[in-house]
Structures are given as C-alpha cells and as structure tokens.
Amino acid sequence: MIDLYYWPTPNGHKITIFLEEAGLAYRIHPVDISAGDQFRPEFLAFSPNNRMPAIIDDDPPEGSEPVSVFESGAILLYLAEKVGRFMPASLHGRKTVLEWLMWQMGGLGPMAGQNHHFVQYAPEQIPYAISRYVNETNRLYGVLDTRLKGRDWVADDYSIADMAIYPWIVPHERQKQFLTDFPNLERWFHSMQARPAVRAAYEKGEPWSGRPAVTEEGKKLLFGQKATRDREE
C-alpha cells in the first residue's frame, strides 16, 4: 500500500496519475497547503522541504522497512522502478525520459509556478514580472510543441515524462496560453486528457478542489517562508 500525502495541485496530480496508470493500491492523506498542514512535525519527518507530494511505501521492492520519498520527480522515478513500467530499460530510452522529466522539474514547473504567482496571487500587479513569466511559459510550450511534432508521446512510449508534464499544461488558461497556438502539444494534451487513468486521477482530487480561494493568511504561509528571522537594522 502506498500512503500518498497530497493536495490537488499539478505536482499532486502527477502522482495520482501514475498510481492510477499502474493500478497500485494507495491511500490519500490530504495536506492542505493553505492551512499549513505541510508544517506539521509528523509530515516534516519524511518531507523536510515542507512540500507535498510525498509517499510512504509500506511494501518496498526489497522487502525492507517502509520507504518514504519526497519531491514529485523522485517519487515518479521510485514508482517506475518499483513496478518496472513507464521508464524504458534501454540506456537511450531512459536518458530521454530523464531529460524531459528534468525539463519539467527544472523548467516548466518553476516557470509556470511563477506565472501563476505573479498573475494571480501577488499583492500587486508587476507588469515586468508578469511579462517575464508568461513569455517564458510560452517559450517552454513552444519547446514541447516542437518535441511532439510527429510523436504520440514525449519520449518513444508513454512514460513518467508525460505524467509529469501534463498537469502543468492543464491550467494553460491561467498561464495566459492558448493551446491552438501549439497544434502538436494540443493533440498530445487531448490524448492525455482522454486516458481513463488520467480522468480517474483528477476525480480523486475533486473532494478538495472546490475549496475556497487561498486566504490572505494562506498566502503568508505559502509565499512568506524564510529560514531565518528578519534582522533588526
């Protein structure tokens, strides 16, 4: 059994997509990030970056004690290796999936995340910041569109790269992007959207998706974190 510590965000959806695709048994433990659940000591014990998702695998491959994993990319890699699916065995195939997984983790996710922040959550509208991140999101969509030309999937076969990228494309309207500008990406997006496991994954998040908008106190929790206190002048 996989215990999944989750909230219905793009990074959370990545993991439910994998678990549904693989048919693994799992339990969801909601981590309300706007209420500060991610700072609870029992959660920090296995997710020290105070971010979800995280998992605890009660039945790891080597039959050892339960294994915890944090960071969505690491979780996808762990689970792919656990079940022996969605990650090619060949050196070339594995290399390609890892490239696009890292592209999402280091590029699309952070840039789209900053896009969301400055467009929707920042206390003041900063035109330069909005333009910077909307444009960079657009550039990354273009990279993905080029990659998908003549391809059904990001790598040679359906993989954790597709699972990682798709949830960050779902909120394309919030990111001020138009899928019709990217025909290859749009085709792939609708193929992903039609997969039964993808639909099931998003349905699993519905009980928490209708929560009220992030409060001002929630924004302080999400966006005001520091490691040290402010120094007095």
Image (spheres, rainbow, N blue to C red):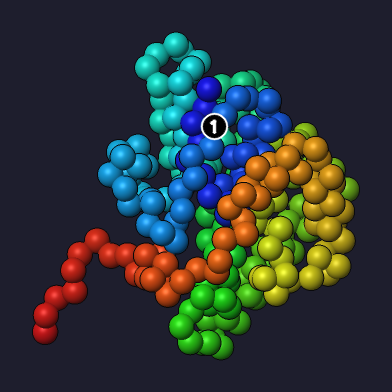
User: Residue 55 location in percent, x, y?
Assistant: 47, 34
User: Residue 212 location in percent, x, y?
Assistant: 56, 66
Badge 1 crowding class, 10 Å Cα cut-off, few under 14, some 14 to 19, many 20 or more, is few
- Left or right of 124, for residue 130: right
User: Residue 51 location in percent, x, y?
Assistant: 42, 50
Q: Is residue 102 visible?
A: no
Name the residue: 83% across, 69% down. Answer: 181
Task: Please name the amino acid that badge 1 sits on.
Answer: Arg
Would you place residue 173 above or below residue 47 in this image?
below
> Which residue is the site of mark 1?
27
Q: Quadrant of the C terminus?
A: bottom left
Name the residue: 76% across, 52% down. Answer: 147
Name the residue: 40% across, 21% down. Answer: 66
Would you place residue 194 above or below residue 224 in this image?
above
Q: Quadrant of residue 216?
A: bottom left
Q: Which is nearer the eye, 211 or 137? A: 211
Outermost residue toward the left in this view: 233
- Left or right of 38, for residue 145: right
Name the residue: 53% across, 61% down. Answer: 110
Q: Secondary structure at mark 1?
A: strand
User: Residue 133 location in percent, x, y?
Assistant: 58, 74
